[in-house]
Image (cartoon, helix red, strand yellow):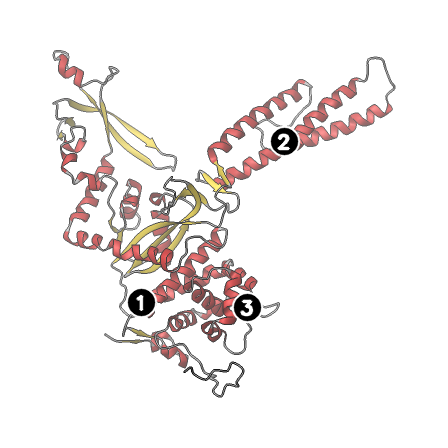
């Protein structure tokens, strides 16, 4: 027997005061978003025009929509019509926003300010409830696909080669004009797009003058000389207008777009082609994406920043600068993996920020193995005489100081080296053979003592009891955040384009994940008092 069911019957009970169940993530979203300072919200208000949707409402809708794996603007708008939690956020007075409203909001510069304030409020809330402290931040990064076609790549090497070939052709055109005794007000080489446009303007003026002169001259035997000159100038002008100028403008735009990168995508110029951690074909194919850097504690994403640079080593110092720009006294320790270990990073963390760090360098793990300690080529296994300033390898070959050396990389970093060369053994042919290379040159080694100092400091901190215990927490602190983003929230690919919209989207996703984790803490924080309009600093209930 089935229950009596009739979809056309009139309901006898209507719940006009529906609220999410106790402990639902909607209470966490409602509480934290409502506590964004009014000064930040008022900064997004416009004095004229049609009244806009409250930014708190749009932010709540996006946070909850991302928790339900919904990233499309149209699907979010449809969800606002059908989902009871979304309707609860909207209340009884406001209509559902359109997908255009939601898309414009998450791509707006004002949303970036709102998210910064939201994360600040969230960090303050965690501090008040004892969920985080100022001991350490765990930093790591992951790559996320951009909303761009994977075959719309532009490579710096290809553009550099093509631009060099174009410069040769423009130089030949310039010499042709000089041979025809045409004065061009250009002195620099190679010619820029502005120079080419000036040349095209001059050629157009000269062609017009020749046309006027040809119209008044009489026919002569052998043809007109002015017509021959005009024909040549028209050919040069056609080359400039249809080939040289458009290509030069494109190459200059590409050079400006590259910055310090080696590639970008035509459909999202801020995305860089990089190797993704998800590689189903296992062929190492480069795909357009962004490098997300997150700093966390207790598995809460506290700070984040998006980079177009695929190398983690180059992102650490800008990221730490951004963190301390928001919170001058954020932490005392920085914990990260070996991808961040480099001499400039160690030196900047020590000298500029006065921070302790637990960051291995590239060879740290290999240096702990027995095979490394038996390697005859490793400088650390050689003996060093401090008084004579000389090294002796395991074959007894002595290397004495020869000169200082300074090296510069493409990023502007400078490294100082001391160069040691092997001494000459005139009376011992066997040792002399060991002291020279196969080509007959003296063997030499370059020692960077600044790098050796910071490596020793990093090793000391990592091998201390406190450092060993703290670094052991890195994996279960930071890795679950990326797992939740890609597995639970299913954020494998961004749905917007451009650095600012993408940064806003990942900020919304990270905050949604934070609030979901916070709402699952049993007997820790209650958000039910938001019904009374209380502030979380006063009304959040914390139980031990």
Relative to 209, does residue 115 appear above or below in the rendering?
below
**Label 1 Cα neighbours within 10 Å, binned few <14 / some 14-19 / many ≥20:** some
Give 383 or 404, whichever is nearer the viewer. Answer: 383
Toward which corner of the image does residue 365 lie, by quadrant? top left
Residue 519 lies left or right of residue 209; in this view the side is left
Q: CA distance from mark 3 to mark 1?
A: 32 Å
- Please give the residue where the numbered disc 2 appears in the rendered image: 243
Q: Secondary structure at mark 2?
A: helix
Among the 4 quarters of the image, the one containing residue 131: bottom left
Q: Nearer the viewer, residue 285 or 232?
A: 285
**First-in-chain label (3 vs 1):** 3
Horizontal and vertical percent for residue 341?
28, 43
Q: Where the C terminus falls, by quadrant?
A: bottom left
Q: Secondary structure at mark 3?
A: loop
Q: Secondary structure at mark 1?
A: helix
* Viewer-nearest residue: 411 or 29: 29
Answer with mark 2 or mark 1, whichever residue precedes in sequence.
Answer: 1
Residue topped by disc 3: 97
Image coordinates for residue 74, horizontal then vertical, percent: 53, 62
Distance CA(mark 2)–CA(mark 1): 60 Å
Is residue 533 found left or right of 138 in the rendered image?
A: right
Q: Nearer the viewer, residue 53 or 177?
A: 53
Q: Position of residue 176 (x, y in %)?
A: 65, 20
Viewer-side label of 2, 3: 3
Which residue sits at x=44%, y=52%? Answer: 493
- Which mark, residue 126? 1
């Amino acid at each position: 027997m089935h229950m009596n069911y009739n979809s056309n019957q009139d309901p006898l009970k209507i719940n006009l005061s529906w609220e999410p169940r106790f402990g639902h993530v909607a209470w966490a979203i409602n509480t934290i978003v409502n506590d964004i300072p009014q000064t930040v919200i008022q900064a997004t208000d416009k004095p004229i025009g049609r009244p806009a949707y409250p930014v708190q409402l749009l932010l709540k809708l996006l946070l909850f929509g991302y928790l339900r794996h919904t990233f499309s603007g149209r699907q979010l708008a449809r969800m606002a019509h059908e989902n009871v939690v979304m309707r609860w956020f909207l209340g009884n007075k406001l209509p559902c926003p359109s997908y255009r409203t939601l898309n414009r909001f998450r791509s707006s510069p004002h949303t970036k300010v709102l998210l910064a304030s939201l994360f600040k409020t969230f960090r303050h809330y965690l501090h008040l409830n004892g969920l985080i402290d100022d001991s350490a931040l765990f930093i790591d990064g992951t790559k996320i696909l951009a909303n761009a076609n994977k075959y719309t790549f532009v490579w710096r090497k290809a553009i550099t080669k093509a631009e060099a070939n174009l410069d040769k052709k423009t130089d030949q055109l310039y010499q042709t004009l000089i041979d025809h005794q045409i004065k061009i007000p250009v002195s620099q080489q190679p010619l820029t797009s502005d120079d080419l446009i000036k040349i095209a303007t001059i050629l157009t003026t000269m062609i017009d003058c020749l046309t006027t002169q040809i119209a008044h001259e009489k026919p002569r035997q052998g043809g007109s000389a002015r017509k021959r000159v005009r024909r040549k100038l028209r050919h040069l002008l056609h080359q400039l207008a249809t080939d040289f100028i458009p290509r030069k403008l494109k190459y200059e735009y590409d050079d400006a777009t590259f910055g310090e990168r080696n590639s970008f995508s035509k459909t999202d110029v801020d995305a860089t082609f990089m190797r993704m951690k998800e590689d189903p074909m296992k062929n190492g194919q480069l795909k357009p994406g962004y490098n997300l850097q997150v700093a966390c504690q207790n598995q809460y994403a506290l700070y984040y920043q998006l980079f177009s640079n695929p190398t983690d080593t180059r992102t650490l110092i800008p990221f730490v600068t951004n963190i301390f720009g928001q919170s001058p006294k954020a932490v005392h320790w920085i914990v990260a993996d070996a991808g961040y270990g480099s001499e400039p990073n160690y030196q900047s963390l020590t000298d500029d920020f006065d921070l302790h760090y637990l960051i291995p360098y590239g060879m740290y793990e290999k240096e702990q193995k027995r095979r490394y300690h038996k390697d005859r080529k490793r400088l650390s296994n050689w003996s060093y005489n401090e008084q004579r300033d000389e090294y002796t390898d395991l074959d007894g070959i002595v290397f004495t100081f020869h000169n200082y050396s300074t090296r510069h990389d493409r990023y502007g970093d400078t490294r100082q080296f001391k160069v040691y060369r092997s001494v000459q053994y005139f009376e011992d042919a066997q040792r002399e053979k060991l002291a020279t290379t196969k080509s007959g040159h003296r063997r030499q080694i370059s020692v960077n003592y600044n790098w050796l100092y910071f490596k020793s400091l990093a090793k000391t901190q990592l091998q201390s009891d406190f450092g060993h215990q703290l670094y052991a927490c890195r994996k279960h602190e930071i890795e679950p955040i990326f797992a939740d983003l890609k597995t639970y929230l299913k954020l494998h690919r961004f749905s917007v384009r451009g650095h600012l919209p993408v940064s806003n989207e990942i900020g919304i996703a990270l905050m949604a994940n934070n609030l979901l984790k916070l709402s699952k803490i049993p007997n820790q924080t209650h958000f039910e008092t938001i019904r009374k309009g209380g502030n979380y600093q006063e009304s959040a209930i914390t139980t031990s």
